[in-house]
C-alpha cells in the first residue's frame, strides 16, 4: 500500500488532492459523479456573512485554454452553510475547509466566529482577493499591511487552521506571503484567478463584455512560478498549489515546484472525475518509482 497522506497545518488528509473553491459547490452536485470520500479534503464555495445572489447571467466566458468567471460570490450565507451544507459534507468523513470572503475585517471575523465551533470544519481558507470596501476597493491581498491585518484579526478569534489564499495580481507575492505568515497564517494556497477581460458572443452583432477572474491551463506557468517563489522563500508553512491543473503531470509539476498539496479547479467542469483520476494516478506513479509514501516522493523530487 502506498501512503498518500499529508498534514496541512494540522489538517490530516488521506491524499494531497482537493477541489478549488468555487468549482465544487458544497458537494451536492459532484456527489453524483464521484466518491467524495476519496478526496483529501473538500474546499467549499466562497462563503460570505450574508447570502449573495451573484451577478446576472451570462457570467462565464470561455477563452483560449481557460475561462473567465464573474460569478459574484453567489452563496447562501454562512448561517445556511452551517445549517445545511456542513452537515451534508460531514457524511463523507474528509476534512471540510470553508472558504470565506468579506468586504471588511469585521465581516471576516464574524464569519470565523460563527464557524469556529462547527463540527466537521477542519480549517478556513481565507480569500484575500476580495475588495476592501473601507479602503477604496483595493483587494486585501494586494497590500501586505491589509493582508496581515485581516489574518491577525482572524488569528485572534479562532483556533482553526488558517489557509490564506493569495491573489496573483501583485508584483511581489513573497512579500504578501511573509506578511500573512507573520500575522498567523498556518498555510498558503495559491494562486487565485487573474484579472481579465473578454467579450461573450451572444449572436450576430451581439455581445457582452465581462471582467472577472481567469483560470484554467493558460495560467499554470505563472502559477507555478509564484508557487516556486514562495517555496524558495521558505516561510515555514505548507503550500497548496492551484492553477490550471488538468492531469497528473500538472499536479507533479506543482509538487516538484514546492507545493505540499494541490487544488483542482477549472478541470472539474470538463471532467468531474479528474480528481479521482489524479489520486489513483499519483499512487501508481510514486509506487512504480519505489517510494512507499507521498512524503518520501516529495523529499526526493523538489527542484
Image: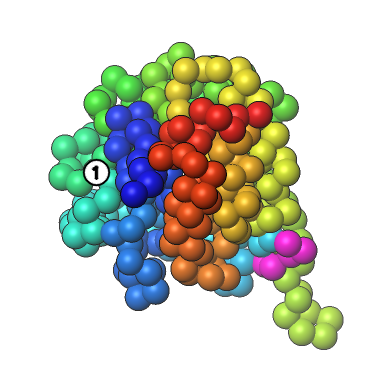
- For label 1, the residue is 121
250 and 146: which is toward the camera: 250
The residue located at (29%, 38%) in the rendering is 12
Residue 73 in the image: x percent, y percent? 47, 54
Say which residue appears at 35% left-offset and 33% top-offset. Answer: 7
Q: Residue 77 versus residue 67: which sits nearer the camera?
A: 67
Within 10 angstroms of label 1, few (less than 14), some, or many (20 or more) residues?
many
Quarter of the picture containing the C terminus is: top right
Q: Does 272 appear above or below 17?
A: below
Queried whether the magenta region covers residue 186, the answer comes back as no
Could you tell whether 119 is left or right of 182 in the image? left
Q: Is residue 83 above or below residue 271?
A: above
Q: How many marks?
A: 1
Q: Position of residue 38 (x, y in %)?
A: 33, 58
Magenta stretch mostly in which secondary structure?
strand
Q: Position of residue 148 (x, y in %)?
A: 48, 20
Q: Which residue is situated farthest in the right direction here?
A: 205
Q: Is residue 62 magenta?
A: yes
Query: Which image quarter: residue 155?
Result: top left
Q: Magenta span covers which residues?
A: 61-65
Q: Is residue 51 left or right of residue 65?
A: left
At a point 41% along the width and 40% down the height, the residue shown is 292
Amino acid at each position: 500500500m502506498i501512503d498518500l497522506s499529508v498534514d496541512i497545518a494540522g489538517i490530516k488528509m488521506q491524499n494531497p488532492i482537493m477541489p478549488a473553491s468555487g468549482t465544487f459547490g458544497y458537494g451536492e452536485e459532484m456527489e453524483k459523479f464521484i466518491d467524495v470520500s476519496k478526496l483529501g479534503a473538500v474546499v467549499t464555495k466562497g462563503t460570505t456573512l450574508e447570502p449573495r445572489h451573484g451577478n446576472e447571467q451570462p457570467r462565464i466566458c470561455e477563452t483560449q485554454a481557460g475561462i473567465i468567471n464573474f460569478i459574484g460570490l453567489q452563496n447562501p450565507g454562512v448561517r445556511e452553510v452551517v445549517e445545511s451544507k456542513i452537515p451534508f459534507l460531514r457524511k463523507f468523513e474528509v476534512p471540510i475547509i470553508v472558504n470565506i470572503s468579506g468586504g471588511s475585517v469585521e465581516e471576516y471575523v464574524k464569519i470565523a466566529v460563527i464557524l469556529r465551533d462547527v463540527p466537521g470544519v477542519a480549517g478556513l481558507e481565507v480569500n484575500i482577493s476580495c475588495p476592501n470596501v473601507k479602503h477604496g476597493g483595493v483587494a486585501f491581498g494586494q497590500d501586505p499591511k491589509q493582508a496581515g491585518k485581516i489574518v491577525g484579526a482572524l488569528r485572534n478569534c479562532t483556533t482553526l487552521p488558517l489557509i490564506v489564499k493569495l491573489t496573483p495580481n501583485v508584483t511581489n507575492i513573497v512579500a504578501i506571503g511573509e506578511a500573512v505568515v507573520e500575522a498567523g497564517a498556518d498555510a498558503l494556497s495559491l494562486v487565485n484567478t487573474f484579472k481579465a477581460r473578454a467579450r461573450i458572443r451572444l449572436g450576430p452583432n451581439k455581445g457582452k463584455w465581462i471582467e472577472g477572474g481567469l483560470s484554467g491551463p493558460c495560467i499554470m506557468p505563472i502559477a507555478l512560478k509564484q508557487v516556486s517563489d514562495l517555496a524558495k522563500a521558505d516561510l515555514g508553512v505548507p503550500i497548496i498549489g492551484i492553477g490550471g491543473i488538468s492531469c497528473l503531470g500538472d499536479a507533479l509539476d506543482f509538487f516538484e515546484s514546492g507545493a505540499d498539496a494541490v487544488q483542482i479547479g477549472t478541470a472539474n467542469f470538463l471532467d468531474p472525475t479528474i480528481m479521482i483520476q489524479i489520486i489513483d494516478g499519483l499512487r501508481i506513479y510514486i509506487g512504480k518509482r519505489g517510494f512507499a509514501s507521498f512524503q518520501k516522493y516529495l523529499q526526493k523530487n523538489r527542484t
